[in-house]
Image (cartoon, helix red, strand yellow):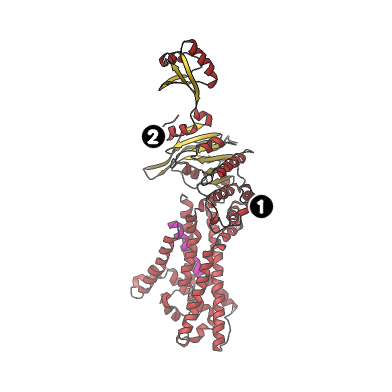
């Protein structure tokens, strides 16, 4: 399996789109977590000046993963599979002999590996931003414990994985990238966003929204220190609930990733490659 | 070990009720031969090749490739293929494209540079595939097919996009690939290509095999065209000759089904019978004539 994953990593690693998405996501994550709220009025921010300091790094950054991060991961997932149809490369991969599911598993593994720098990059950039702010404010530059940081990084990765898997599924279903990205963003913004917004007033929607990626992503972020107040007032990605327990969030995210990947695998295994 | 590298029985692919892309195809490709798969566009060549590679599932019928089910890892490990235009990652270099495929195929890393050199792309191997000409992409596709040093090579229109010199080079290359017991299936609609390269040819029309044999078998026996006076008497005399298999009139000429070696004897017999013979020439159907006869409306199995 290792050689298959190495081959797939070469495809992702040398693709400009991977690095463009990584750069944009890192920039946006830091911009909306630190630059904009600090520049506007730091005392007025939900957590006051404390949320910009290194001690709050985990919660402040995780806040952006379920919304912005999810969409970037979705696009990465779409590109990983959808582009293969556009370039007509699946036939070449599938005739090499390892079997369709092995190729697919290698693609998913490589994608999951590539998501690691997506999390580490944001945490590195966020740490730098929080250090600068601590310096400006003359505040202590103490970071959270290594254990909390590790859990936060793992949670960030886990929030992105199901979105990437959804991107893979959409790429396979639509056999391309454009429609898949359109449908994915529509799902993220309209289906999950609007239904979550109405969940407060329409009680029948609440059980449904509790299995959404967004609800569970934010719930996991909240379990690791992200401020629920901040999540509820965080600009375009604001989310007011419902929140679920951390363990449930973890289970739903893992199950969603498995379900999306499984459906994509089923489709890919059975469908003709024209 | 079976004599046939590829064997299909009533292989059929339908798209919905109306479209029959491949219709009960019985195909047998022998070990070590270069088999030409000829047919007009849309005849079902590529769909057949895709079914043999496991990319497309047949609606009915079955096939065995190198003794294995199409698409099985055991079979694919011994097959190299290029179906239609080669699928390439445009932003990867030619070498990296092959490294990806070699990784999945389990080919030794050294094979990448070896096959690049074999197809004459060694000097451009580090350039991105999107900068390659059509001909270079075709050659990279052939290089990819060779990565596993396969027993069976399936090439679908490999000379597409090549200039005349490149086509000649590719044909010679394909012939050289067939040496050492390798079987090559070459799909094409170019008569010259098939005529020069292939040991046997199968012609497909509307998804069905309408003729199969060596190029000479398909072209049939030569005919002698005879200009003689009077024509009717000449036809009667010719019909009685043992070397003449058939007599037909075509305008002011007789067309005799006979070998060219019999021409002197036929001439002597006609002159002895008081017939004035002013011309005897050989006429042999070209593969293109045969192909057009088989694949255009009104053509049928031979």
**Residue at the extreme right:** B110
Sequence order check: which comes first, mark 2 or mark 1?
1
Residue in the foreground of this view, choosing between B229 and A150? B229
Q: Position of residue A112 (x, y in %)?
A: 54, 64
Pick out the residue farthest to the bottom: A138
Q: In terms of depth relative to the viewer, which is nearer, B270 or B194?
A: B270
- Which part of the image, by quadrant, shows the N terminus of chain A? bottom right
| Residue drawn at x 63%, y 38% as measured from the top left | B179
Q: Residue at x 48, y 84 (%)?
A: A39
> Is residue B210 in view?
no
Disc number placed over residue B297 in the picture, else none: 2
Q: Position of residue B36 (x, y in %)?
A: 52, 37
Q: Is residue B166 above or below residue A26?
A: above
Q: Chain of mark 2?
A: B
In the image, the segment drawn in magenta is A158-174
The x and y percentages for residue A29 are: 50, 75
Note whether residue A260 is visible.
Answer: yes
Instruction: Please identify, in this view, whether the residue under mark 2 or under mark 1 is nearer the observer.
Output: 2
Image position of A200 (left or right of A168) = left
Q: Chain of mark 1?
A: B
What residue would you read off at disc 1? Answer: B110
Tell me whether marks 2 and 1 sit on the same chain.
yes
Q: Position of residue B28 (x, y in %)?
A: 52, 35
- Residue pictured at 47% horizontal, 20% vertical: B226
In the depicted view, which residue is nearer to us: A14 or B168? B168
From the image, give the main secondary structure of the stretch colored magenta: helix
- Queried whether the magenta region covers residue A146, the answer comes back as no
């Amino acid at each position: 399996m290792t050689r298959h994953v190495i081959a797939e990593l070469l495809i992702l690693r040398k693709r400009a789109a991977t690095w463009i998405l990584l750069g944009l996501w890192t920039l946006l994550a830091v911009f909306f977590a630190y630059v904009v709220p600090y520049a506007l009025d730091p005392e007025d921010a939900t957590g006051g000046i404390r949320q910009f300091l290194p001690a709050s790094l985990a919660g402040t950054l995780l806040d952006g993963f379920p919304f912005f991060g999810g969409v970037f991961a979705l696009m990465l997932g779409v590109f990983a599979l959808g582009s293969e149809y556009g370039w007509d490369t699946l036939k070449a991969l599938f005739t090499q002999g390892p079997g369709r599911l092995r190729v697919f598993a290698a693609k998913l593994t490589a994608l999951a590996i590539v998501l690691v720098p997506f999390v580490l990059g944001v945490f590195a950039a966020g740490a730098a931003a929080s250090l600068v702010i601590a310096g400006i404010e003359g505040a202590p530059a103490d970071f959270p414990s290594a254990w909390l940081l590790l859990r936060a990084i793992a949670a960030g990765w886990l929030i992105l994985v199901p979105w990437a898997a959804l991107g893979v599924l959409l790429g396979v279903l639509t056999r391309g990238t454009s429609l898949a990205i359109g449908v994915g963003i529509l799902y993220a913004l309209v289906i999950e966003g609007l239904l979550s917004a109405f969940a407060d007033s329409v009680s029948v929607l609440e059980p449904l929204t509790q299995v959404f990626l967004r609800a569970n992503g934010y719930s996991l972020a909240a379990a690791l220190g992200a401020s629920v107040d901040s999540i509820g007032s965080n600009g375009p990605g604001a989310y007011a609930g419902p929140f679920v327990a951390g363990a449930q969030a973890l289970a739903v995210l893992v199950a969603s990733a498995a379900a999306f990947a499984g459906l994509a695998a089923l489709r890919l295994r059975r469908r003709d490659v024209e | 070990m079976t004599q046939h590298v590829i064997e299909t029985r009533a292989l059929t692919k339908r798209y919905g009720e109306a479209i029959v892309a491949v219709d009960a195809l019985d195909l047998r490709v022998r070990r070590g031969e270069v088999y030409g798969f000829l047919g007009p566009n849309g005849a079902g060549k590529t769909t057949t090749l895709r079914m043999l590679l496991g990319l497309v599932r047949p609606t009915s019928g079955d096939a065995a490739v190198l003794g294995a089910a199409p698409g099985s890892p055991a079979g694919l490990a011994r097959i190299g293929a290029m179906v239609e235009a080669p699928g390439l990652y445009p932003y990867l270099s030619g070498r990296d494209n092959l490294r990806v495929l070699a990784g999945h195929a389990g080919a030794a890393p050294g094979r990448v540079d070896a096959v690049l050199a074999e197809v004459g792309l060694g000097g451009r191997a580090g350039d991105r595939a999107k900068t390659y000409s059509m001909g270079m992409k075709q050659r990279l596709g052939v290089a990819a097919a060779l990565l596993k040093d396969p027993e069976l090579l399936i090439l679908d229109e490999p000379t597409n996009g090549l200039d005349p010199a490149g086509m000649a080079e590719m044909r010679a290359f394909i012939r050289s690939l067939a040496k050492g017991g390798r079987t090559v299936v070459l799909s094409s609609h170019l008569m010259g290509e098939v005529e020069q390269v292939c040991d046997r040819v199968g012609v497909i029309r509307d998804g069905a095999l309408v003729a199969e044999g060596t190029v000479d078998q398909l072209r049939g026996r030569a005919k002698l065209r005879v200009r003689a006076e009077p024509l009717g008497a000449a036809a009667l005399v010719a019909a009685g000759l043992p070397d003449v298999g058939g007599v037909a009139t075509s305008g002011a000429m007789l067309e005799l089904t006979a070998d060219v070696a019999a021409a002197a004897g036929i001439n002597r017999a006609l002159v002895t019978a008081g017939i004035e013979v002013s011309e005897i020439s050989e006429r042999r159907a070209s593969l293109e004539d045969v192909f057009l006869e088989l694949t255009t409306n009104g053509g049928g199995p031979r």
